[in-house]
Image (cartoon, rainbow, N blue to C red):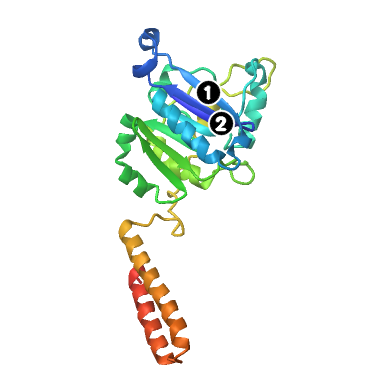
Amino acid sequence: AQISFWLAYMHLLLMLCPNTKFLTPPSEQVHQSITIVRLYLPINELKGAGKQNFETLIFSLCNILRPLHGAAGLGIQHSYEWENYQHIEYELIQEYRGVDLCSPSGNKKWRTGYTNLNWYTYLAHHWVSKLGTTEDLLTQLDDVRIGVLPYEWGTIFRAGNWPALGKATIDPRPELYVMVNEVLKPLRVNNIGSLHYGSIAGEIRLNERTSNQWMRRFDLPKDSPKPKPSPFFRRVSMEEQQRLDASKQMFDAFLNRNSDDKSNNSQANRQRFLLDTLDALSAAIGT
């Protein structure tokens, strides 16, 4: 099952592929088709407290529908005659890599791996477990801008605080999308199939080859090294946080003592206390 919430052009699209073991009819279990649930919201929904409300909505729907996989972010909202405009959709997704394409139908292959990766990506727990524990994922995604959010039926991955447009001429591979993609791609479907119908009058649409190229748009070039986590955004361990808190208390004490000593003109004491504080800070950060 797949879910996607998208800021579909520009709206918020939420697409879910619900778990067939939970609420799909017997015919779907027999024929191995796949159910897709899509929700569109205007991008204005992210204003103010909307971003947190949006994440809460994702959690609620994932807990209700228990999807196999899904995604949420910037996307294109289809019209009733969407097949007549696939050539326009093709142009848009080539120009803006962060904009997702959400086909209203799926195929059996989508049961074997996820098909969408975007701002939010959610995967069932029996898939995520193949990558390790939550602690393992936090180690691999060592960046505080990336959310690793486990829930009862799976894990939700958030690539940054805001969705990335991914304009091809400026930022074709958004940094955080690439980092999440590098960790999750072993769970990706091998062949997504063709996401568009055939050309009618020579217009360019997606075929099976270009659909698979699009699905891999956040992959790094072959033989490229994996991106290293930025030291400015790395996660701080509990032990490191305790040392930093202790150092902060010492520094605050120094400032308070410095203020008291001004009246006594105790310059030697201030200098000695400052050196002690700097030594403690150096020890706390491991230098």
Q: Residue at x 62, y 22 (%)?
A: 78
In space, the residues marked 1 and 2 are separated at their CA atoms by: 8 Å
Compared with 135, 80 (above or below) is above
Q: Residue at x 40, y 82 (%)?
A: 274
Q: Are marks 1 and 2 in contact (CB under 8 Å)?
A: yes
Q: Residues within 10 Å of mark 2 (few under 14, many from 20)?
A: many
Residue 196, image x, y percentages: 58, 20
Work out whether residue 268 or residue 88 is closer to the camera in this orientation and state it.
268
Q: Residues within 10 Å of mark 1 (few under 14, many from 20)?
A: many
Compared with 115, 171 (above or below) is below
**Residue type highlighted by circle 1:** Arg
Q: Residue at x 40, y 42 (%)?
A: 148
Left or right of residue 136: residue 106: right
Residue 282, image x, y percentages: 36, 73
Q: Residue at x 67, y 17 (%)?
A: 84
Which residue position holds label 2?
Answer: 6
Left or right of residue 245: residue 73: right
Q: Is residue 46 visible?
A: yes
Quarter containing the C terminus: bottom left
Q: How many discs appear?
A: 2
Which residue position holds label 1?
Answer: 38
Quarter containing the N terminus: top left
State the image quarter where residue 204 is shown.
top right
Residue 244, image x, y percentages: 37, 65
Q: Secondary structure at mark 1?
A: strand
Q: Residue furthest right?
A: 201
